[in-house]
Image (cartoon, helix red, strand yellow):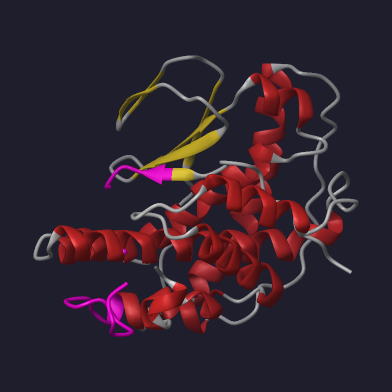
Amino acid sequence: MRTLLVALMAGALFSLPLTGTAHAVPGTSAVLTGNPLYKTGTIPQQTCEEPAFTSASHDGARLYVIEMSACLDRVWSAQVRKAGFTWTKPKVVVSHKDRVKTACGPYYPGDTFSLYCIGTGTIYLMVTDSALSDELNHPRMLESLAIGYSYHVQQLGGILREERRAEAKMSKKQRWALSAKVSLQNLCLTGAFLGSVWDSLSHTKAYGTDLIIDWKSVEGDHKEHGKAKNRVYWEQRGFDTLRPGACNTFTAPAGRVA
């Protein structure tokens, strides 16, 4: 039986900073509500062997990311092409510094997370000492990298571009609602990837869903990223279904995307 572990505050941002009473956010289009990605079916179960990660080393982290990126490329390229979009690999940059210079500007990471810069299609994975020392038990790098890839998939599918177009005509409250929907969809896509490879992973099978619930609850609620309970719901939904079609947050009930 598959189980899911999600890291505390492991997440991603993208270079552009989505409740309402209606199912669809006002002003959004079929690019969001009926994207071809939703019709690509179930992601097949994959074999994704993780490289040995036996020491708290930056070099070890780089090797890990290279290997796991190859797996993410394989999984998502197939789904993106099924949707009729052109697949391009994102560039992945691994940093282990207090200050990280990115194409989106400088960042000062306080935890392991990834940043996706739309303009260059680059994922910046920022790794902390705690992640290096405990990745075997708490795969923060794995989830953060997967979230960065999910933003890349949303970009290739036109979702991030459509968000930028739509939010230009929205109030601040509507922009927050749209941002939350994009973020929650990202977690669902991340869950779908993790679920497709989970049985082949070597070091996380002993950990169950209690940790994802506890950690996401600790993070609290965010207007632009959704309530903690909804972040738990959408990542678990993707993990259980393995279907991008289950990640259509743009037509979901309002209470599920707040």
187 relative position to 175: left or right = right
Percent across and percent down for residue 46 are 77, 63
Count of marks, rendered view: 0
- Of residues 183 and 221, the one drawn nearer to the viewer in this rendering: 221
Residue 22 drawn in magenta: yes
Q: Residue at x 76, y 59 (%)?
A: 209
Main SS, magenta residues: loop
Q: Residue at x 34, y 55 (%)?
A: 223
- Of residues 165 and 75, the one drawn nearer to the viewer in this rendering: 165
**Residue 183, above or below 83:** above
Residue 87 visible here: no
Residue 213 visible here: yes
Which quadrant of the structure image shows residue 171? bottom left
Q: Residue at x 87, y 44 (%)?
A: 203
Most extreme residue toward the left is 169
**Residue 94, above or below 137:** above
Question: Which quarter of the rendering shows the C terminus?
Answer: bottom left
- Of residues 45 and 100, the one drawn nearer to the viewer in this rendering: 100
Residue 126 drawn in magenta: no
Question: Which quarter of the rendering shows the N terminus?
Answer: bottom right
- Of residues 3 and 84, the one drawn nearer to the viewer in this rendering: 3
Percent across and percent down for residue 254 are 38, 79
Q: Residue at x 86, y 24 (%)?
A: 54
Percent across and percent down for residue 66 are 65, 35
Task: Specify start and end residues of the magenta stretch as a single range.
Answer: 13-31
Percent across and percent down for residue 168 are 11, 60
**Residue 111, above or below 252:** above
153 relative position to 159: left or right = right
